[in-house]
Image (tube, rainbow, N blue to C red):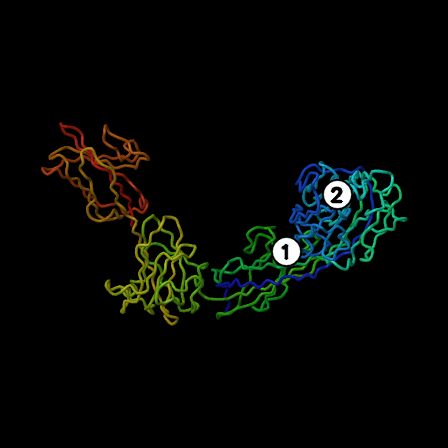
Amino acid sequence: MKLMFKGLTALVVVALSAFAQQTATYTFSTDNPGPYAPITGGLVLASGAGIDDTFFNNVPIGFDFPFGGTATGSGWTSVMGVSTNGWAKISNVAGSATTYNFASSTAQARTVGAFGRDLQAADANAEIRVETLGTAPSRVCVIQWTNFRPWTSATSNSQLLTMSFDFQVKLYETTGVIELTYGTWDIGSTAFPAATTSGSVGIKGNTASPVTDYKLCTSTSTTFSWSAPFTTTSSATNGHYVGTAAGKKPDNGLVYRYTPSAFPPAGLSVIAAASQSSWFITGDPVISASVSYAPPTAAVSNLALTIDTTSIGGPSNVPMLDDGLNGDAVAGDGVYSHRPTVYSTTTASFNFPITATATGATNGSAAVAIGIYTIANDVPTGSIVVTRGQNGPFDNTNALSANHTGFSTPCSPSIGFRDLFFIYTPTCTGTATFSTCGGDAVNLPGELGDSQITVHDMSLALLGCNDDAGTTTGLCGPNGWQSTVENVAVTAGVNYLVRVAGYGSSDVGNFYLNISESSAVATTFGTSCGAFPIALAGLPPRLGQIGTLSVSGARPNAAGIMGFGGVPAVPGAIGACPLYIDVAGPTFVINTFASDATGSWSYTDTLPSDPSIACLTIAVQAATLHPDGFESSNGLQLTFGY
């Protein structure tokens, strides 16, 4: 026998691809594309003559930067730290404010330096500025040091006091390229002084020590050339030495470029979930899944998702499609779907592995567990729509024995078992009553003899609950163990969740769910000029029932009128009397009357049974005319209900 899915357990096991911390070898090159271009916008981290030994943590880069070409979660970061001493740490881990030579420090992993040494502001125009330029995916973050010089005191080396350096570190989105760019360097004379003139230039890897596969510029005092430096990966010679010969400074516009080799393959992660968030649905289910991959800028192609349906006797490697069909809501949104068919006659659970593949990526996988049940509304997401009146019969025999999350102890002392769920949308604002009473009156075979009802809003907040309604009506079972929840306040057009359960796990059978609305309302308001009341005698204004309007306290034997019409937005007036009815409206109707010798009058009529006037509110007001003047009653509003 072929049995379509009647339920879906959205139990999702997500298998995330794991990435070891991978580092790529950078290719070092030099360039001089043109004069140094200072930035003028962005964020100023510090300015003025007092800048010295400060570290600025969590500075935004403006995008995720792939330091080292590693996978997201290890090497990629959107924030960095910036030191006044000529280097930046591409990490959210704080660095040391007093570290000068980052290459020799065992603590400064993931560091880029254009001239790492003990620096300070050269004058009042010094500043450190950060700006992200361009648009995604080709942005560049620029960190700029302006008017900095080596730290010194006037007594140690006066020439250092006259120096001024401008330089930048640039981080390129998508490519992961790092550039060190040099501007104007005023060294105060033709020769760089010999004392304390070394500086770390280069990049340092994901681990503090050893430097491993990251490159630093290095030299000796006699062989170093800014335009053609040596590079090293050895932690023994970490940094370059400017030297003492004349002209040992970078040319304006010089660029040191570090280009990572190919990024590691993207690692696919399947994010799988049933399109319904709970266990049961009506009709064939849809299994949907999406994919993430890291690094997010890595090139992938031919992305495909397949699902294995061998657990239900189907084939393996069935394509999941992103075409807007088969339950997929929108084509091209990155959500892939498949609608399987199960051949089964019993309650069962099945597992569906999902695999994602792509060119240039490692595979990712996940699994979705599906529960098959024969009752669609055994959980809230499968709720059956019910309306005012008698609904059913329903049978909870094949429902799950356990109660569901969010409904643990709604009715003391029972928690309720084998529960079924319904959606009710009231026609009118008012109150509603929900009951399983009435099954005995129609000789319902196999009746559920001991029930429980709870009513909730759609956030599962409890609005009403009943376990045993009692036997006073004679309609609630032979033992009075059927249930009635009365007078739940409801709003027209708003959905409510109704849960019917057995008292215990063995309480099963057929039941009706009866719903009645009590939305008929009669409201008096206002004060009258003549101070005689109008009232509604008998029952509230329910459709099809007899209602009586009466007037008392009027002038005896006086001619009068009673008007029916719409409710004005703002009460008007007739002379000095308030007017609570819209006399200019299209529904305004007048009936004439004459009060009796006691000043009373009444009007009785049967309200229409037409459902189209349900929830309609009208206004009623009366007046008498006599030689002594005009008298008005109070106002009355009638809302027709069931």
Element carrying mark 1: strand
Q: For this view, does 87 lie left or right of residue 474? A: right
Q: Residue furthest left?
A: 597
Give residue 193's quadrant in the image: top right
Numbered circle sitting on residue 596 = none
**Alpha-carbon span between mark 1 and mark 2:** 34 Å
Q: Could you say where residue 275 lies in the image, as x and y percent from the top left?
A: 53, 57
Residue labelled with disc 1: 292
The residue at the point 69 percent across, 50 percent down is 97
Quick check: 32 above or below 388? above
Q: Nearer the viewer, mark 1 or mark 2?
A: 2
Q: For this view, does 537 lie left or right of residue 95? A: left
Q: Could you say where residue 572 lies in the image, as x and y percent from the top left?
A: 28, 31
Q: For the residue marked with disc 1, what is the amino acid?
A: Ser
Crowdedness near tag 1: few (<14), some (14–19) or many (≥20) residues, C-alpha within 10 Å: some
Q: Could you say where residue 279 lies in the image, as x and y percent from the top left?
A: 49, 62
Residue labelled with disc 2: 168
Residues at circles 1 and 2 in contact by the CB criterion of under 8 Å: no
Nearest to N terminus: mark 1 or mark 2:
2
Q: Residue furthest front?
A: 155
Q: Viewer-proximal residue, 79 or 151?
A: 151
Q: Viewer-proximal residue, 202 or 381?
A: 202
The residue at the point 13 percent across, 39 percent down is 600
Q: For the residue marked with disc 2, what is the amino acid?
A: Gln
Q: Could you say where residue 564 lies in the image, as x and y percent from the top left?
A: 25, 37
Give residue 504's quadrant in the image: bottom left
Q: Viewer-proximal residue, 111 or 568?
A: 111
